[in-house]
Image (tube, rainbow, N blue to C red):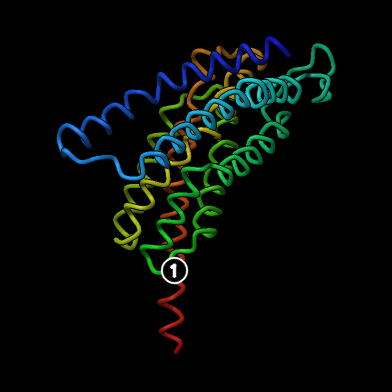
Amino acid sequence: MVNLLVDFFKILFYTFLDVLPILTIIVFFQIIILKQPIPHLRRVILGGVFVVLGLALFLMGLEKALFPIGEIMANQLSNPEFLGIVEGEVIHWTNYYWIYIFAAAIGFSTTIAEPSLIAVAIKAGEVSAGTISANGLRITVAVGVAFALALGTFRIVTGTPLYLYILGGYIIVVIQTIFAPKDIIALAYDSGGVTTSTVTVPLVTALGLELSGAVPGRNPAIDGFGLIAFASLFPIISVLAYSQFMFLKNKMFHIKK
């Protein structure tokens, strides 16, 4: 218990140091440049305290729970005994299907819970006057990340080069951008960035590194990284594809009417 408290106060201290430059810049511009008092000062201070405390608790949870879970699941799901491999038998990429399913499930669930995606989805719904559904956008992005992580773990297991997948993915994005409705392109591109945030990154990174360490012949430094690149790219593809599908569906509906 004592060690837990010591770890928490260390994280709290370093979190405060990380937030301090942002607060300094805001206060400097408000008081020195704009020469205006900070409105609702008590509320701002209380909000700052909650932000630092919340971030520290969140980082503590990542360190003590999410990272270990990612490591344990990767090791267990890639264990030859779990895969039903007899000693001396060659392990084929098809034996790792539980890894692909787990990666897809963890990608979908972490993306749905991603705070930055929730914020973007709500704002997108507001500025579009309800044309873009916040829940629909979140689900579409989450499906993209789920597919991305399943494909990314497949790449780790097979050992194929990362650049082939990323290059192919961006070629698809370029083609989609040409034909997609123009008012959705910016949102689609932003959807890729907001998925690689506080919830998704720690768990996905732990999964990639531990999986590459557990699969025979893989090097964590070479093969373990890259899952985040998949998680950034494929949501763009899924959102553009969804917008194109809805555009064609609405067009067909109007033609029939």
Residue 39 is situated, as x and y percent measured from the top left of the image, at: 31, 44
Q: Secondary structure at mark 1?
A: loop
Answer with left or right where residue 222 lies relative to residue 58. left
Q: Quadrant of the C terminus?
A: bottom left
Q: Is residue 169 above or below residue 205?
A: below
Answer with left or right where residue 135 lies relative to residue 39. right
The reply to whether residue 78 is in sight is yes
Image quadrant assignment for residue 207: top right
- Label 1 sits on what residue type? Gly
Of all residues, the one furthest to the bottom in this rendering is 257
Q: Is residue 223 above or below residue 257?
A: above
Q: Residue at the location (43% across, 41% down)?
A: 194
Q: Which residue is mark 1?
A: 130
Answer with left or right where residue 40 lies relative to residue 162. left
Residue 26 is situated, as x and y percent measured from the top left of the image, at: 27, 33
The reply to whether residue 157 is in sight is no
Q: Residue at the location (49% across, 16% down)?
A: 13
Q: Quadrant of the N terminus?
A: top right
Q: Nearer the viewer, residue 212 or 202?
A: 202
Image quadrant assignment for residue 57: top right
Q: Residue at the location (66% across, 17% down)?
A: 215
Residue 196 is situated, as x and y percent measured from the top left of the image, at: 47, 35
Q: Nearer the viewer, residue 22 or 194?
A: 22
Q: Nearer the viewer, residue 18 or 121?
A: 18
Q: Is residue 36 above or below residue 141?
A: above
Q: How many marks?
A: 1
Residue 83 is situated, as x and y percent measured from the top left of the image, at: 79, 25
Crowd class of label 1 (few under 14; some 14 to 19; many from 20; radius 10 Å): few
